[in-house]
Image: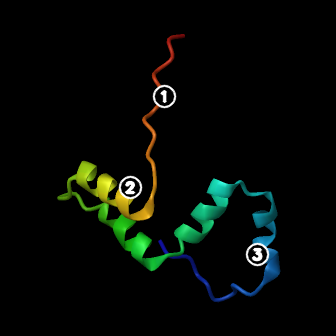
Amino acid sequence: MTPDASQWRMSAHYDHVDDLTASDLAWEWLRRNEDYDHDFGSLANPDADPQTLIEKVRRHWGLRFPDRPPARST
């Protein structure tokens, strides 16, 4: 999941940063963190308990995982 960082000095690759919200900006840098990448990758393990991993990620990285919105009746 870690992106190719070989051209990180090219400012054109970061023009989109000017339009990001605070949470979008936090995500841009968090997703480049190898420790976070490892923790996130653990969620793909079929033998892992997802609730335990979500709680670990929540505590360690200060993230919240909001519940899905209720289904709308149409």
Q: Position of residue 71 (x, y in %)?
A: 46, 21
Callout 3: few (<14), some (14-19), or many (20+) C-alpha neighbours within 10 Å? few
Q: State how far apart marks 1 and 2 are (Cα).
A: 19 Å
Q: Which residue is mark 2?
A: 58
Name the residue located 45 percent from the left edge and 33 percent from the top edge: 68
Q: Is residue 16 left or right of residue 45?
A: right
Q: Is residue 34 left or right of residue 17?
A: left
Q: Position of residue 39 (x, y in %)?
A: 35, 68
Residue 54 is tagged as none
Query: Residue 54: percent from the left, percent from the top?
Result: 33, 53
Which numbered disc, 1 or 3, marks the residue closer to the eye?
A: 1
Circle 2 — which element? helix
> Mark 1 — residue?
69
Q: Residues within 10 Å of mark 1 (few under 14, many from 20)?
A: few
Q: Residue, x 76% and y 65% (percent of image)?
A: 17
Residue at image point 76% right, 73% down: 14
Side of 47 where 20 appears, left or right: right
The earlier-in-sequence mark between 3 and 2 is 3
- Mark 1 and mark 3: span between their CA atoms? 34 Å
* Secondary structure type for disc 1: loop
Q: Is residue 74 above or below residue 57?
A: above
- The residue that appears at 48% across and 28% down in the rendered structure is 69
Name the amino acid, label 1. Pro
| Residue that carries the numbered disc 3 in the rendered image | 13
Q: How busy is the neighbourhood of tag 2: few (under 14 within 10 Å), some, or many (20 plus)? A: few
- Image quadrant of residue 32? bottom right
**Count of marks placed on residues:** 3
User: Identity of the amino acid at label 3?
Assistant: His
Determine the residue located farthest toward the left in the rendered image.
47
Q: Which is more toward the observer, 59 or 3?
A: 59
